[in-house]
Amino acid sequence: MHDLIRDRANSTHYQWGDHCDGWFLVNSPELTIIEERMPSGTAEKSHYHLKAEQFFRILSGVATFVLSGEHFEVEAGSGLYVPPLTIHQIRNDHQDDLVFLVISRPSTRGDRIEEQQG
C-alpha cells in the first residue's frame, strides 16, 4: 500500500523543453497527474488536445497562460481549467521557478496537436 503515496522521489521523471522537469505522480490512460517545474524564461509550445481536459494548479511561482490569444497570470494557490480543443500555452515570465500540477483526463498521450504558426 505504500506505493499509493506519491512524490518526486518515487515517480518517473522526464525532462522537456528548455531544462523543464516533470514527474508522473499518476500515469494511466484515463488520468495523468504530473508535477512540473519550469525555470525562469521558459515556455511550452502553443497546442491543444482533441479529447483531454486539463487543470493546472500552481504550487509556487506565477504562471502566464495564453488561452486562445487571451493572457492570464495565475499565482500559487490558484489554478486554471483548460477544456478540450482550447489552444493553450504556459510560460514562466518571472524570476523564480514555476512549480505546478497538471491534471489531465484522459491522458494526453497521442492527443497533443501543435498550433500551426502562420
Image (cartoon, grey):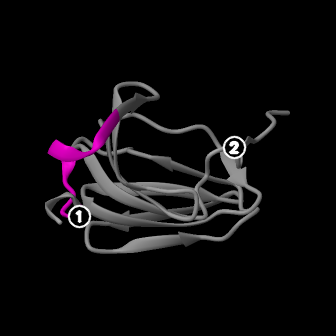
Left or right of 69? Residue 8 is left
The quadrant of the picture occupied by the N terminus is: bottom left
| Amino acid at pointer 1 | Leu
Q: Are there few (<14), some (14-19), or many (20+) residues within 10 Å of tag 1?
A: few
* Residue beneath disc 1: 4
* Residue occupying the point 69% across, 57% down: 69
* Residue beneath disc 2: 110
Q: Which residues are magenta?
A: 4-13
Residue 100 in picture, x, y percent from top left: 32, 57
Give how far apart the Cα atoms at labels 1 and 2 are.
26 Å
The total number of labels drawn is 2
Extreme residue in the front direction? 1
The answer to whether mark 1 and mark 2 are in CB contact below 8 A is: no
* Residue occupying the point 71% across, 66% down: 84
Assign a secondary structure to mark 2: loop
Residue 9: image quadrant is top left
Extreme residue in the top direction? 18
- Camera-near label (1 vs 2) is 1
Residue 56: image quadrant is bottom left
Q: Earlier in the sequence, mark 1 or mark 2?
A: 1
Residue 105: image quadrant is bottom right
The quadrant of the picture occupied by the C terminus is: top right
Left or right of 30? Residue 93 is left
Left or right of 100? Residue 91 is right
Assign a secondary structure to mark 1: helix
In the image, residue 97 above or below residue 16: below
In the image, residue 50 lies in the stretch drawn in magenta: no
